[in-house]
Amino acid sequence: MVKNRLMHFLNTNNVIVNYQYGFQKAKSTLDPLTHLEYAIRDTIIKADYLIVVFLDIEKAYDMVWAHGLLQELFDLGLRGNLPIFIQNFLSNRTLQVKIANFISTKYKLENGLPQGSIISVVLFLIAINKMFSKCDKTINQIFCDDGAFWSQHHLLDVAERSIQDTLNHLTQWSKETGLKFSVQKSTYCIFTHRKTQNLTLKLYNTDLPRSYQVKYLGMTFDHRLNWTKHIRILKEKCQKD
């Protein structure tokens, strides 16, 4: 009931950004996958460069800043019993660890969203809703905590500057919210049939690794979009079954 009322408020006021596809009515992984595949095909047809950065948020649910989330709900204009319920839901939570017959003492959780709760998913969407709010030089999309953004241009350095500008904004957003991107698991890929060199893209002043094949929302994209790797993986799964 609480989840439905919260979603009604968010949908009525168009709160959730339109490039968030996770847990949204009439949206699925096919939407961001189709948009990305179209951008890659358009790049190849035009002989351009498409730089895509795939983001991974470390311990996404566990790192949500509870006070910041409640402040965001207030800024959205949410009043009455619903925000009070959410505040109580996030307050005075504890955890214990059990190994064999031994149980640890209780530890109070200052931040984070409870795993497995139906309302936690919606609260997480609100927590990351402004992730790309100042990133207008790139095309951005999110599926829950899986983020990706890209820039297409016939000059590689122009696309690179747009990507770095977005990375700078994301770094600042990360510092303000407490959510952190994993530099090791985040990566970039250059989709093109033209020759390329490695780029110096920095997140937290650390170079992002380059990948030539990326698994994104269950599909494996290679930098030339020939689907060879994806088909091979599907074949191996079918043979195991």
Image: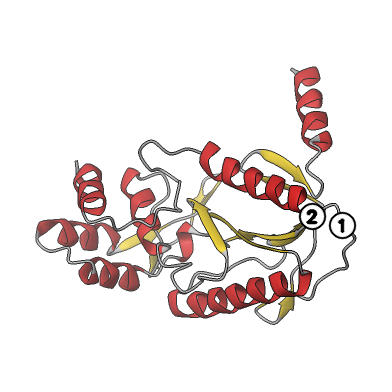
- Give the residue displayed 76% in from the left and 27% down from the top: 234
Q: Quadrant of residue 189?
A: bottom right
- Residue 160, horizontal then vertical, whole percent: 72, 72
- Give the residue displayed 74% in from the left and 69% down from the top: 208
- Residue 219, horizontal then vertical, whole percent: 68, 38
Label 2 and label 1: CA atoms lie apart by: 7 Å
The first of marks 2 and 1 along the sequence is 2
Callout in the foreground (2, 1): 2
Q: Is residue 211 above or below residue 2?
A: below
- Residue 71, horizontal then vertical, whole percent: 27, 73
Q: How many marks?
A: 2
From the viewer's perspective, tell me whether residue 195 is left or right of residue 26: right
Label 2–label 1 contact, CB within 8 A = yes
Question: What residue is shown with label 2?
Answer: 47
- Residue 136, horizontal then vertical, whole percent: 50, 70
Q: Does dot 1 land on a helix, a strand or a loop?
A: loop
Q: Does dot 2 land on a helix, a strand or a loop?
A: loop
From the viewer's perspective, tell me whether residue 121 is left or right of residue 138: left
> Which class describes the residues within 10 Å of circle 2: few (<14), some (14-19), or many (20+)?
some
**Relative depth, front residue between 152 and 229:** 152
> Which class describes the residues within 10 Å of circle 1: few (<14), some (14-19), or many (20+)?
few
What type is the residue that disc 2 sits on? Answer: Ala
Q: Quadrant of residue 53?
A: bottom right
**Quarter of the figure with the C terminus:** top right
What type is the residue that disc 1 sits on? Answer: Arg
From the viewer's perspective, tell me whether residue 16 is left or right of residue 136: left
Q: In the rendering, which numbered label is found on residue 194?
A: 1
**Relative depth, front residue between 13 and 181:** 13
**Quarter of the figure with the N terminus:** top left
Residue 107 appears anywhere in the view = no
- Give the residue displayed 59% in from the left and 42% down from the top: 33
Q: Is residue 97 above or below residue 182?
A: above
